[in-house]
Image (spheres, rainbow, N blue to C red):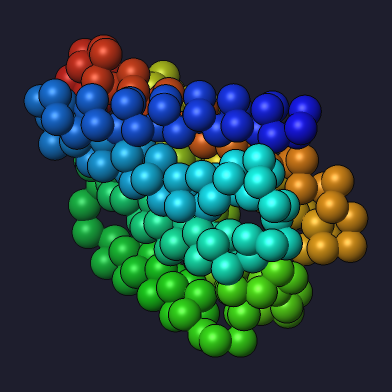
Amino acid sequence: MPQAIAETVFDVLYLGFALVAGLTMLVNGKDPLVKKAGLMAALLGAGDSFHLVPRAYALWTSGLEANAVALGAGKFITSITMTVFYLILYYIWREYYKVTGRKILTGAMWALTVLRIGLCLLPQNQWLTYRQPLLFGALRNLPFAVMGVMMIVLFAGEQKRTADDAFRYMPVAIALSFGFYLPVVLFSGVAPIIGMLMIPKTMAYVWMVSMCLRLYRQPELIRKNA
């Protein structure tokens, strides 16, 4: 019961923040860049809700294993939406830093996105079982991790070049999100306590959304970078 209470409170606060921040930027944002950030944040909250809501229900009722189908389906949806999240973040990077051309880079991001989603669609993932195969967990996250590394390098490079303030810590937040997430994918099956790393992973995403929210609250940051 303490776990159910703690997780539910945390999840409600997280999903509420992501959805409210995202919809606020999407609906009220004046700049197309802010609207992209709003779409990204709203997608984050909506996608994660498919996994976190069934998880909260499971914790309050018959347990996680008894709700394996709902949890697996939610995890599958979240895997897709998180992939699109990073694709949108790539376009935010391009627009904010006024990046043009670089078609090979854009093609690589799209190829990794399609590869990641394609791997998630394979039946060998066994999404609807309580314990999915570790091999496919690692395989489907490989292109996702490459996307993350690319975004770290891209944001760090532009931040160094421009001394930008708005996304100064974006490379750190992305690195933390993957640093906490990948051990869960690889080792939570044998050591469930590692699943606790999903909490700081989630906080890293809150940090990322908060940086995007600054563009809505302080539009001069966009004009300054123009």
Vertical comparison of 45 with 190: above or below: above
Picture residue at 50% right of the left edge, 29% below the top: 12
Picture residue at 61% right of the left edge, 86% below the top: 124
- In the rendered view of the protein, which quadrant contains the N terminus? top right
Figure disc tally: 0
Q: Is residue 195 left or right of residue 158?
A: right
Vertical comparison of 20 with 136: above or below: above
Picture residue at 14% right of the left edge, 24% below the top: 28
Q: Nearer the viewer, residue 55 or 178?
A: 55
Residue 178 image position (x, y, % from top left): 64, 49
Kindly tell me whether residue 176 is visible in this rendering.
no
Vertical comparison of 82 with 6: above or below: below
Q: Is residue 214 left or right of residue 77?
A: left
Q: Is residue 12 left or right of residue 6?
A: left
Residue 186 image position (x, y, % from top left): 77, 63
Q: Nearer the viewer, residue 59 or 141?
A: 59
- In the rendered view of the protein, which quadrant contains the C terminus? top left
Picture residue at 64% right of the left edge, 65% below the top: 68
Kindly tell me whether residue 184 is visible in this rendering.
yes
Residue furthest to the front: 61
